[in-house]
Structures are given as structure tokens and as C-alpha cells.
Image (cartoon, rainbow, N blue to C red):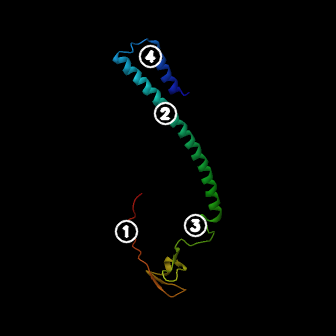
């Protein structure tokens, strides 16, 4: 029993010991309020228990995420976890024609590149003037 449910039970005991006139409207109101206090105390106890469980679960997940972050840092997570050594200006795209992966360097082309596998000209629209959405 939590402190809150104990207090609700104490109030009910006080009311029972007062020998109130059960036919009086004020007594009916008092009894209804005491019932409400008790129900609220039980619900709050239940929520408190659930919050404790969720907090423990979050702590456990936080530990697991730390382990995953450590693994990724060991294999080179800055490049998606492949372990490769990538230039910051380098990225990969898939050719729209042959679907093969092409590594491109931003310093080596403007708005287009040629697929080394099928010869398709691939055009890019780099509009850096657009603002990124906040959030």
C-alpha cells in the first residue's frame, strides 16, 4: 500500500468514526469524494508502477544502445558501418539504367556523371540555396 492509498484509507476511517448521518446530503457528498480519492490513489499507484517498469526498461535499452554504439565505432560507423575509409566528398548512387552502384566525388563533376558500366549520363540537381526544414 502506497502512502497515497494509506491516506485515502485513513480519511475513510475518519469519516466512518464520525458517525455521520447517512441520509444527509453532505454525508453523501463526503462518501462520494472519499470513493473518488480511493480510486484516484489506486490509479496513481498503478501508473507509478508502470512508470517504474518503463524507466527500468529505458535504462536497459540505454545500456544496449551504448554497446551498439561501441560496436559501430569499432567498425567505422561514420561510413554506414562498412568499415571502409571514405572521403567526405564521396557518395554512392545507383545508375537509373543498369542499377549498379557508382561511387562519385563531388570535386570531380558538376551536375552530371557518366555510368562506368553502361555509359548512361546521370544528371543531378544540387540546389544548395534551398533551406533545410527545421526539426
User: x, y (%) of residue 47?
Assistant: 50, 37
Tag 1 residue: 130
Q: Is residue 10 left or right of residue 129?
A: right
> Nearer the N terminus, badge 3 or badge 2?
2
SS type, badge 4? helix
Tag 4 residue: 15
Residue reaching furthest to the left:
25
Q: Is residue 56 above or below residue 83?
A: above
Q: Are marks 4 and 2 in contact (CB under 8 Å)?
A: no
Q: How far apart, in angstroms, are the residues tagged by discs 1 and 2?
A: 49 Å
Nearest to the eye among marks 3 and 1: give it: 3
Q: Give whichever of 135, 59 is nearer the camera.
A: 59
Nearest to the eye among marks 4 and 2: give it: 4
SS type, badge 3? loop
Q: Which mark is residue 87?
A: none
Nearest to the eye among marks 3 and 4: give it: 4
Q: Are marks 3 and 1 in contact (CB under 8 Å)?
A: no
SS type, badge 2? helix
- The crowding category of the residue bearing disc 4, from other C-alpha atoms within 10 Å (few below 14, some 14 to 19, many at least 20), is some
Quarter location, residue 35: top left
> Nearer the N terminus, badge 1 or badge 2?
2
Tag 3 residue: 80
Q: How far apart, in angstroms, are the residues tagged by discs 4 and 1?
A: 69 Å
Quarter location, residue 102: bottom right
Q: How far apart, in angstroms, are the residues tagged by discs 3 and 4?
A: 67 Å
Tag 2 residue: 44
User: x, y (%) of residue 57?
Assistant: 58, 46
Q: How far apart, in angstroms, are the residues tagged by discs 3 and 1?
A: 26 Å
Amino acid at each position: 500500500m502506497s502512502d497515497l492509498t494509506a491516506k485515502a484509507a485513513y480519511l475513510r476511517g475518519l469519516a466512518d468514526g464520525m458517525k455521520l448521518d447517512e441520509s444527509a446530503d453532505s454525508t453523501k457528498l463526503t462518501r462520494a469524494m472519499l470513493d473518488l480519492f480511493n480510486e484516484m490513489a489506486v490509479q496513481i499507484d498503478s501508473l507509478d508502477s508502470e512508470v517504474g517498469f518503463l524507466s527500468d526498461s529505458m535504462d536497459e535499452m540505454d545500456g544496449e544502445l551504448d554497446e551498439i554504439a561501441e560496436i559501430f565505432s569499432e567498425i567505422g560507423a561514420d561510413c554506414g558501418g562498412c568499415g571502409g575509409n571514405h572521403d567526405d566528398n564521396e557518395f554512392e548512387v545507383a545508375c537509373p539504367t543498369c542499377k549498379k552502384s557508382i561511387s562519385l566525388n563531388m570535386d570531380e563533376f558538376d551536375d552530371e556523371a557518366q555510368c562506368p558500366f553502361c555509359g548512361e549520363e546521370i544528371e543531378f540537381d544540387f540546389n544548395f540555396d534551398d533551406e533545410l526544414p527545421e526539426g
